[in-house]
Amino acid sequence: MSIKTRIRNRWSRLWMRFSGQGPLGRAACWLAGLGWPPFYGRLPLAALGRDGYISSSATLHHSNLKLNARVFIGDQALIYEDHGGGEIELGRGVHIHRDCFLQTGRQGKIIIGDETHIQPRCQLSAYVGSIQIGRRVEIAPNCSFYPYNHGMSSDQPLRQQPVQTKGGIVIGDDAWLGVGTIVLDGVTIGEGAVVGAGSVVSRDIPAMAVAVGNPAKVVRIRSAAP
């Protein structure tokens, strides 16, 4: 390890001791990141601070946000509380990468388990229903989660229809969602399931299944290696 790298690491450890959600904590993360490459290159910083790493360009506007150790929140991520929004909890080692949007409103909540990674430009919008994601889940870029829907009766304009839920979204441990997957209200994706890129999940996917398409259909069950 070069002298330059050792100095950088010591500098970063010093400032990450003060990391946190507030203005001073965010400033400490910015100082700690000086000299580090962007994007994935800053993931190691999350392990250096008690409260993880929060990019100075991320926006946190939520009164009930719980961050566990080693959380990483990347550039331009937005965590937002709308009227009546429930909690957002990010487990230990969760990664929320750049341009992701997490919001809660009307008692909806978002719970994300330990070591789950959410890649760029994903949207988790929890209104009325909740989004519960297990541990070690891998979510590719441009995925969307909607645990609610609007009524569509003909007696009033669509924008005035009540928001409804069938019970929210649940994703089991160790699942993997491909690029551009859309998960709709009332869906459970089982433990270890794989959902192919571009799929629209409108019904339950069993554990260890591989599902693809619009609507997503099971094409096979993953089996243990011989």
Image (tube, helix red, strand yellow):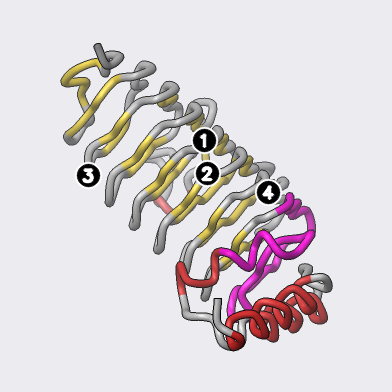
Q: Is residue 43 above or below residue 145?
A: below
Pointer 4 local density, CA inside 10 Å: few below 14, some 14–19, many at least 20: many
Q: Amino acid at mark 2?
A: Thr
Image quarter hosting the N terminus: bottom right
Residue at (34% x, 40% y) in the render: 177
In which quadrant of the rendered image does the C terminus lie?
top left
Dot 2, crowdedness within 10 Å: few (<14), some or many (≥20)? many
Q: Mark 3 or mark 1, which has the lower sequence index?
A: 1
User: What SS does tag 3 mark?
Assistant: loop
Who comes first in sequence, dot 1 or dot 2? 2
Q: Residue at x 74, y 55 (%)?
A: 65
Magenta segment: 44-69
What residue does disc 2 label? 116
Read off the residue under disc 4: 88
Kindly report which numbered mark, 2 or 4, lies closer to the viewer in this rendering: 2
In the image, which disc is placed on residue 181?
none
Q: Give the alpha-carbon distance from disc 3 to disc 1, as whole Å.
A: 27 Å
Q: CA distance from mark 4 to mark 1?
A: 20 Å
Q: Tell me which numbered mark, 4 or 1, is placed earlier along the sequence.
A: 4
Q: Earlier in the sequence, mark 3 or mark 4?
A: 4
Label drawn at residue 197: 3
Q: Quadrant of residue 123?
A: bottom left
| x and y percentages locating residue 76 in the rendered image | 52, 75
Q: Given this view, does label 1 or label 2 mark the residue nearer the observer?
A: 2
